[in-house]
Image (cartoon, rainbow, N blue to C red):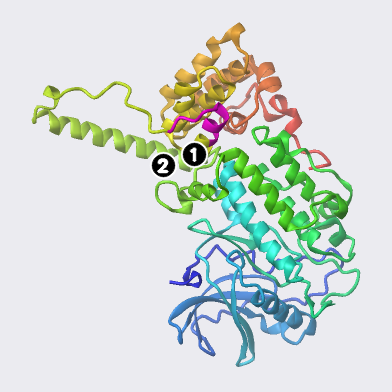
Amino acid sequence: MSSTDHDQNDESQDSGLESATQVSPSTSSTSSPAQDLSGVVLGEFRLLRRLGKGGMANVYLAEQTALNRHVAVKVMKSDLVSDETYLDRFKTEAMAAANLNHVNIVQVYTIGEADGYHYIAQEYVQGMNLRDFIRRKGPPELPVALHIIRQIASALQKAGEAGIVHRDIKPENILISRKGVVKVADFGLAQLTLGGERMHLTQEGVTMGTPLYMSPEQVKGNKVDHRSDLYSLGVTCYHMLAGRPPFRGQTAIAIAMKQVNAQPAPLHKRRPDLPKRVCDMVHKMIAKKTTDRYTDAGEVLLEIRQIMRTLQGSKDEIAVTAFEDSTGSLSEVVTQPRTKAASDSSAFNWTRYVLLGLLFLIVGGGLGWFARPRLPQNPPLQATQRSTPREQFADAMLAGSSEDAWKALREFHRTSEERWRAEVRLAILYLNQGRYDEAGKIFENFIEQGAADKFNLVPVGFAGRAVIASLKRDYATSDRILSENSQRITEHLDGPMKPLVQETVRQNQAHLEKPRITLEKLFPEELPTQES
């Protein structure tokens, strides 16, 4: 089976299809109501159903009858065919992507015209776009994020070598298959260099792209090169890691001007758990001056691989396991913090396992279960001992949801700082699984550290206490705990507990008439500023 035989659901190529926004006055025409072409046959492609729509084209799931396979067919809107600029852009996309044979770029099969409809037949990818991935799962764990970034950078390196500038890199145009394969889509705004001569499909001074991810030189309508794509990649990475883009505003113009003039809030303030080198990499990509960025995507790839080797202590390919988890499904990737639905699901699964265990115990009783030798109280950990706590912690990061991997720090590196960081992760794992009593024991142990606390564990302990109370719907107690410990939490709480506490405050505010603690009081530095 070839890589082009993937399927894709309705959401995968929806808003990421054609989302070019002109910061200068728009020249696009007003489109007529979208016509559904489901059932229509265009050449050898039978359109089955519409997957999504954009400003320039609609996308359909189609059957390529000659090869008996599913493809995605982009059909240009009929009211734009008469506009040579849009027609050229549409053809440019096919030319750009068709010349890029790369695993991380959506493959274009053919471009055609039938019955007055212009269309592009391309690879059909099962999964979701990065925007939906972030919205549904929140900021991913670092190994998952690096795995995604590495593949995007690889695609941009291939495009750069072919003299192609994408000009619209953003989460909507990054597709992720269920096996964790990342593909860059939508070369509709691509700038081509063919035969040493650059093709210009937009007027000078007209800015094309999406303001949230657009480079400063794009905003100003200046000439762009592959470093513009690196800027957009950097903004996309910032969004993925922080859960929001670096700049926001009321209008497209306001956001675009921030790309030119404002500095983003430091990524390490939004994600203090990230390694400094990762934050530095993202900020280098989003430097205002092109000369301050990486020279090309190849340099970004080298940086990512070095980071991954430092984190993992082995080859960078091991990061793929973060996508596969226990089922090999992208939908099973564990992220922190998880949504309430995911927590409910984990709690349900844990309850199911307990019930099954009880059933097994009852049935086994009639077979002399209690006459059998007892299992050891502490069975051996299913984790490999590493020589340093840093390597052990990296193993646990890659394992993600493995209880034993986090416990290995307790077993093998008891006095290290990484051991206590692992205890925090273990407590969060228990929270996600609905094992509140076990999480509570860890948090209470933190509080008992008192004067002996060297690693800021006491604030985490009180924060965990408040989170558990809120999860048990005792919002008043949760609010009181946060209020009584607000100073130590404000000054010292960081890392993966911080977003959980922020969500706890939101829940408390939603259920209490007069909460003592608000996000403004507890985390004033997190409030939106003119830079955000």
Amino acid at pointer 2: Ser
The label shown at residue 345 is 2
Q: Quadrant of residue 380?
A: top left
Residue 436 or residue 450, whichever sits in front: 450
Percent across and percent down for residue 326 are 40, 46
Percent across and percent down for residue 282 are 73, 46
- Mark 1 to mark 2 CA distance (whole Å): 17 Å
What stretch of residues is rendered in magenta? 384-394
Instruction: Decide: is 427 above or below 201.
Output: above
* Crowdedness near tag 2: few (<14), some (14–19) or many (≥20) residues, C-alpha within 10 Å: some
| Residue plotted at (33% across, 35% down) | 351
Q: Marks 1 and 2: which is nearer the front?
A: 1
The label shown at residue 400 is 1
Report the quarter where the C terminus lies: top right
Q: Which element carries disc 1, helix, strand or loop?
A: loop
Instruction: Decide: is 20 above or below 521.
Output: below
